[in-house]
Amino acid sequence: MKFINLLPLAALSSALVIPDEETMAELDIVDHHQQETILTPIHKDVKHMVDEAETYVSTAISTAGSIFDQAVDFYSNTEQKAKKTCHKKAYDTKAWLESKTEYAEEKIKEVESAAEKAKGGHHCKPNMTVYELIAKSKYTTKLAALINEYDDLVQLLNATAANYTVFAPIDSAFEKIPDHAPKPSKEELKKVLLYHASQEFYPAGRVLVTHTVPTLLVGELLGGEAQRLSTNVGIKGLTVNFYSRIIAIDIFGTNGVIHGIDSLLVPPPKATDIIQFLPGEFSTLELGLAKTGLFKYLNDTSNHVGGTLFAPSNFAFQLLGPKIEGFLFSKYGLKYLAALLKYHVVANQTLYSDAYYASKDTDAEVSGIPKGYFHIDLPTMLKDKSLSINVARYGRLISIKINAFATVTIEDGIAADGVIHVVSNVLIPPKEVGGLTTHWAGEELEVEDLKERLMPYMENAEL
Ligand SMILES: *[C@@H]1O[C@H](CO)[C@@H](O)[C@H](O)[C@H]1NC(C)=O
Ligand SMILES: *[C@@H]1O[C@H](CO)[C@@H](O)[C@H](O)[C@H]1NC(C)=O
Ligand SMILES: *[C@@H]1O[C@H](CO)[C@@H](O)[C@H](O)[C@H]1NC(C)=O
Ligand SMILES: *[C@@H]1O[C@H](CO)[C@@H](O)[C@H](O)[C@H]1NC(C)=O
Ligand SMILES: *[C@@H]1O[C@H](CO)[C@@H](O)[C@H](O)[C@H]1NC(C)=O
């Protein structure tokens, strides 16, 4: 696979790893003497960084000239400090984990107030466009050189009737690309550049309460909708697509805002590539998809326009118990397995945790998912049998439940052809008895129960 495809996969592999039970248990340990969880020191580090960021925002705003340079200078100092403390204390916890903790809300408030102050600092109005800021900064010479190869991009980012957001990789981000990596074509490179900018205005305060951001890159496999990137809060601080750290925030231009990042953002691979690349997490799912022909079907992007895959982890399959797992993966279980897996695939509709790309042939009007509570039924490939999805979102805090029981443990695995949400349990179709729909709520299942639930869909379980 080309380097350009591998980079996001490598990043995903570190972000999408669910710890085993033992690690989970360790993370739950509370030191009752101090009333602190293991995560507390990490929170403190991040808090410290955000505190400093706040100080920075209020001072930088009043300084003219090479605003970008100062922002990066400032952050490289704090970053060094934060790195030391994080390394000492942090467990090998992954970005996804802390994004769920209560501290996020507090953090959001702090950055919001910093952003608020920044807005108030009107005594120094920006006088350069985002393009000019990038072109003039000593930290973004490589990015500027790349942008300059495309006249239309220069014009775009220099246009004043806009409010862009640019995630600008600083020069050292380019050093991470191995020397032997094949040089991408001019066309590929342009896609990479477009993936760093959004038509919409996302100052830091908004980034913090956002899960996915639409970019200028057209998602060819998403029916022309914007390809999105994800933003995350974790021990690495604020990151984009889990791996690229935001190292400078809120550098305002006349036509938008820039955030400096430490790694290049590479457009995401296909969902099937992601599944394949993470055997530690998805080898059972991959095997099931392969055995039933579904892998090939999903891998062929001409079969769908976007889509949502609810991906049970290996652990989720184990929870079904050895009898059911054995049955599903036996010769006799194959058609049941096919039906079951189809129940995890929503074709042509892409549901991110905070955005929704409806299928062209539904008349759904929704595109953004409102804050608070949101419900939607999504038809799966299993004879249009729907999944009942409830999203509760308060800023960065989010909870996604499926059929009132299964939980999304990791949301927004961004793929070129849709999105992957990792689910805590295999999703089992409900039972229909006397017109009543009863969802499975995790009670122990016998092979016969499972067969009975899947029986109504058997006759055309083949693709
Ligand atoms: C922007 O303003 C600063 C300070 O007022 C000045 O030094 C700089 O030359 C100006 N830049 C442009 C492009 O006008
Ligand atoms: C960018 O726009 C400014 C006006 O906002 C203009 O002075 C400058 O020449 C433009 N630069 C390029 C490279 O088009
Ligand atoms: C940019 O955003 C500001 C503040 O939200 C708004 O007042 C302004 O009209 C926007 N400009 C454009 C060109 O959309
Ligand atoms: C998946 O699709 C790619 C092309 O995008 C192809 O090279 C690969 O062989 C396919 N894999 C399977 C298992 O169908
Ligand atoms: C999804 O869209 C493709 C292409 O438009 C179409 O062939 C397919 O039947 C659709 N699938 C579903 C489940 O609607």
Image: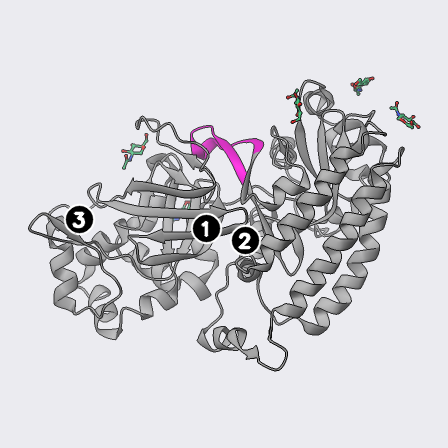
- When asked about the image quadrant of residue 370, the answer is top left
**Residue type indicated by callout 1:** Asp
Residue at image coords 6%, 51%: 434
Q: Are marks 2 and 3 in contact (CB under 8 Å)?
A: no
Q: Quick check: 430 left or right of 130?
A: left
Residue 456's disc number: none
Q: Are marks 1 and 2 in contact (CB under 8 Å)?
A: yes
- Which badge, 1 or 3, comes first in the chain's sequence? 1
Dot 1 beta carbon under 8 Å from ligand 4? no
Residue 9's disc number: 2
Q: Residue furthest left?
A: 434
Where residue 450 appears, as percent x and y from the top left, is 17, 62
Residue at image coords 54%, 55%: 12
Residue 273's disc number: 1
Which residue in the structure is indicated by mark 3?
Answer: 461
Residue at image coords 27%, 68%: 320
The span from disc 1 to disc 2 (Cα, nearest Å) is: 8 Å
Residue at image coords 48%, 49%: 413
The span from disc 2 to disc 3 (Cα, nearest Å) is: 32 Å
Specify start and end residues of the magenta stretch as a single range: 215-228
Where residue 46 appears, as percent x and y from the top left, is 69, 59
- When asked about the image quadrant of residue 292, the answer is bottom left
Where residue 309 appears, as percent x and y from the top left, is 37, 48
**Residue type indicated by callout 3:** Ala
The span from disc 1 to disc 3 (Cα, nearest Å) is: 24 Å
Where residue 110 appears, as percent x and y from the top left, is 68, 50
Q: Quick check: 333 left or right of 270?
A: left
Q: Which image quarter is the C terminus in? A: top left
**Residue type indicated by callout 2:** Leu
